[in-house]
Image (tube, rainbow, N blue to C red):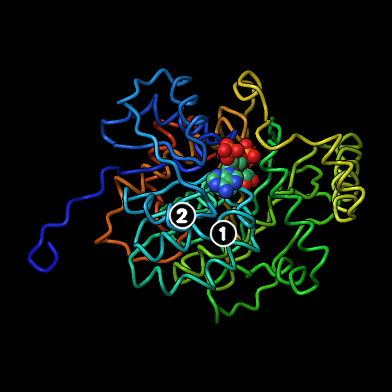
Amino acid sequence: MQNGLTVSPPPHDLVAFGATSFVGKILCRYLWEEFGAQGEIKWAAAGRSNAKLEQLRRALGAEAGALPLVVADAVDEASLRRLCASTRVVVSTVGPYALHGEPLVRACVESGTDYCDLSGEVQWIRRMVQRYDATARKSGARIVHCCGFDSIPSDLGVHFLQRQAVQRLDSPCTRVKMRVKAMRGDFSGGTVASLMNLIKEAAADRALRQELADPYSLCPAGYASNVRQPQVRRAEFDADFGAWVAPFVMSGINTRIVQRTNALSHQAYGAGFSYDEAMLTGRGLKGRLAALAMTAGLGAFMRAAAIRPARALLERFVLPKPGEGPSPEAQQRGFFDLRFLGQTADGRRIRTKVTGDRDPGYGSTGRMLGQAAACLALDVHKAATSGGFWTPATIFGDRLIQRLTAHSGLRFELVPDAPD
Ligand SMILES: NC(=O)c1ccc[n+]([C@@H]2O[C@H](COP(=O)([O-])OP(=O)(O)OC[C@H]3O[C@@H](n4cnc5c(N)ncnc54)[C@H](OP(=O)(O)O)[C@@H]3O)[C@@H](O)[C@H]2O)c1
């Protein structure tokens, strides 16, 4: 009720914007199969092309009246305001976010509409927090970036480990390592475009390179920590895991989100908390050679992508184009297995793992994003959580772990304290 007038609720609980993107189609199929369209969650599919949206609706086998469609363009602010007025929550897969995402975030924070996405673009997330956190706090809009493979398994994986540590060891772990034990999956054109755009921006901007190197770059302004964060930059032996490790490409975003979670939760993981991520490559000479090859390969790719002509060649001949990505069979065959080791300040240890039964970037990501959006729409009530920029662990926590375990093929488990 406002000024004696009854304000009717928006027609949709959730709108999936970017429904015709590669990952958007996976998300919509998942939402359709999991929720229908007019059941527990009343949702609509949105994008810039009505013809493509109609095609998506036909592919899902939905009747014309069953799944509403909303046409909006990421550069047309009026259409974004209409989109926000039609729903309580927007979930967006329109990326690269650094190129297309800001007008929608602005429309959401100004209208008080909740929002989540798949952005893993640190520089853009930092800009959004700096520009819009104050407005989101006033309007009540809850904004949650990084609701895909980056960074839900890392952020909720550390949250889960810390909860186990507090229950079993009576104290959070001040040192946590995440190691990718195994993973099978490919990139889509949209993810490659986001990565290429980040490398291009960083190559041209020294201040941005410094910002990207700061492990606390996503912590709130004024947050102070003098803990030097470890980082695996090259092949090295990790005695805790009894195996060789190499740098992990997603650690640049995941570690920043985990540190933001610690900062937003008033250092629930401790003032001296440190966290890093790496890939396990195995034992002995074979493991060492694999770690050296992986480090060299990643370094060569990053150097090539930073040089304009080489980047153009990679984009033209090697990498997937926007709209392309792994086949449904490849998504089914994919999986991931992440191992976490936590150590308390007095040296007691705990190990956990997070696994997923689809390829990380698409099959699993579509389902993680769908459940994050459902959690925002159904579980996390406005009255209980203020507006602002949250992380998956701080706003969803155990509620999303329950959803992912029950409906998205993820598992969060305690494992014996022995090298994997
Ligand atoms: N965090 C993770 O784990 C994760 C995993 C996967 C993907 N991602 C991210 O998700 C994003 C999408 O990836 P993707 O592979 O699905 O990309 P994609 O297939 O290239 O799709 C991009 C989408 O953006 C839409 N778009 C572009 N300009 C627009 C505009 N002006 N107005 C409205 N829509 C517009 C396109 O619309 P049309 O369909 O009409 O062309 C398309 O649907 C990327 O940023 C990627 O990095 C993250």
Q: Quadrant of residue 318?
A: top right
Q: Which residue is drawn at the image coordinates 49% and 26% (left, top)?
A: 56
Q: Check the picture and name the quadrant holding the N terminus.
A: bottom left
Q: Is residue 260 left or right of residue 199?
A: left
Looking at the image, is 209 positioned above or below residue 95? below
Q: Looking at the image, is 208 positioned above or below residue 237?
A: below
Q: How many labels were placed on the picture?
A: 2
Q: Position of residue 234 (x, y in %)?
A: 85, 53
Determine the quadrant in which ligand 1 lies.
top right
User: Residue 393: which numbered mark, if any?
Assistant: 2
- Which mark is first along the chain, 2 or 1? 1
Residue pointed to by mark 1: 258
Label 1, label 2: how far apart the Cα atoms are: 8 Å
Q: Position of residue 420 (x, y in %)?
A: 68, 37
- Asked if the residue at tag 2 contacts the one at tag 1, i.e. Cβ–Cβ closer than 8 Å, the answer is yes
Q: Bin the neighbour count of mark 1 within 10 Å (Cα to Cα): few under 14, some 14-19, many 20 and up.
A: many
Say what amino acid the circle numbered 2 marks: Ala
Q: Residue at x 57, y 64 (%)?
A: 259
As rendered, which of 308 and 299 lies closer to the eye? 308
Is residue 153 visible to the viewer in this orientation of the structure?
no
Q: Residue at x 68, y 35 (%)?
A: 188
Relative horizontal placement of residue 264, taking residue 139 as reference (left or right)? right
SS state under label 1: helix
Is disc 2 placed on a helix, strand or loop?
Answer: helix
